Amino acid sequence: MDEIGRMDRDHVWHPYTRFSAMDDEPLPVIVRGEGIHLVDDRGNRWVDAISSWWCCALGHGHPRVVEAIRRQAGDLQHSILGNLAHPAAARLAARLAGRMPDPRVHVHFASDGASAVEAALKIALQYAHNTGRPERTDLLAMQGAYHGDTLGAVSVGFLDAFHAPFRHVLRPAAQVPVPASPADEAACIEAARGVFAAHGGRVAALIVEPLCQGAAGMRMHSPAFLRSLAGLCRAEGALLIADEIATGFGRTGTWFAFEQAGIAPDIVCVGKALAAGYLPISAAIVRDGIHSTFADTPADRTFYHGHTFAGNPIAAAAALAAMDVYEEEGIPARAAVLGAKLAEWMAPLARLPQVSEVRTLGLIGAVELRPDPPGTGGEPRARRVRRRLHERRILSRPLGDVVYLMPPLVIAEDALRGLVEALHEAVVAAG
């Protein structure tokens, strides 16, 4: 495995990884996964407290998903969806439709979350063109939003720390403020109304991460706020795109976060946990009233957009098996129950002097740390907490000053409580 480490260091470009991180110590080499754990080449068992970038909702090595992959791999490995169909994609589209408020939808498959967002944005813009409203070329997004790293997704989710080098080639979306607390929600809705007014009927769509903005530091807003945004979109004739890539499939305690607001988005983007994180697959789920405008008669309005591996049979089979498990084992409801315990167990962290706020939603728990006093220097507090957790073989990736837990939804109650206790101890020890 020393040879693997050398090849990795010499040739792998690790995403979101500072070069200096590899100077500090060798990166763990993960060789297998078991439940909530990842196991490295030295036999160390790491608790996957972030579900491997928020997607391994059923943990690692779930037998039903693994078997579905094996079975499908023996039958059909790949077939394009351009002018062809295959059973796994058809069944998965129907299953996703059945989970929408109105099942009259069509599913445009893609490979990853950013690709689903790109499709959704282009669909919204072409829909305006198809329906004789070509002036609707503007997109709105929420402050601090993140929707992926392709250029269209960056335009509606620009984060200076990530995307500053690309600013000159983007057409950034106008931003709607996000409330810092429920008391701010009315003012933010008024501000959103002002943003729409400033664009004078030119808005094609607003894209929202429902209830929780992930990369912004697990910033949360209420279902009532989301419901008000949906009402504003309807009043203004703009589409509402719900980016459920991080929040879908039970993470917030319901199948989709938008359900808690009692709304029906025009387009829903899903990914990550769609196939339990086992294979790359994503989708933009589009209501039929939009889809029907893309006919090719009397004029050709075909959506000329797609991906080679869109709806790949093996990935779709994995997603179908994952959805079976979500349904049969009541995973979303289980996440709601465990989420209430998570909120209770994390509450004491808010009393620590180095903590400014604790936020929870379903099985998402975030601790926002106060910055170190000016002139302190040295390693930032969040990185010190991360280091303490890693010493205990708990994987974490802080977002700025925010350290969060987003474990697999199948985590046992005692393991979840142990994670919270370890986080509490790490925050105290980091000072």
Image (cartoon, grey):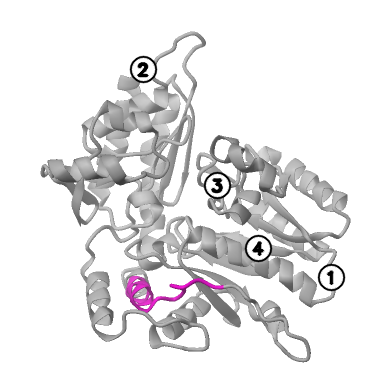
Residue 46 drawn above or below residue 56? above
Q: Alpha-carbon distance for marks 1 and 3?
A: 30 Å
Amino acid type, label 1: Arg
Amino acid type, label 2: Gly
Residue 316 in the magenta stretch? The answer is: yes
Q: Nearer the viewer, mark 1 or mark 2?
A: 1
Residue 348 in the magenta stretch? The answer is: no
Residue sitting at x 60%, y 67%: 119
User: How many numbered callouts?
Assistant: 4
Q: Alpha-carbon distance for marks 4 and 3?
A: 18 Å
Residue 176 at least partly seen: yes
Of the numbered discs 4 and 3, the one sitting upstream in the chain is 4
Query: Label 3: which residue?
Result: 213
Q: Is residue 94 left or right of residue 28?
A: right
Of the numbered discs 4 and 1, the one sitting upstream in the chain is 4
Residue 99 drawn above or below residue 178? below
Residue interval drawn in magenta: 306-322
Element under disc 1: loop
Residue 244 at least partly seen: no
Q: Alpha-carbon distance for marks 4 and 1?
A: 16 Å
Residue sitting at x 40%, y 88%: 87
Query: Label 4: which residue?
Result: 121
Query: Label 2: which residue?
Result: 431
**Spot occupied by residue 179 in the image (x, y as percentages of width and height):** 66, 41
Amino acid type, label 3: Gln
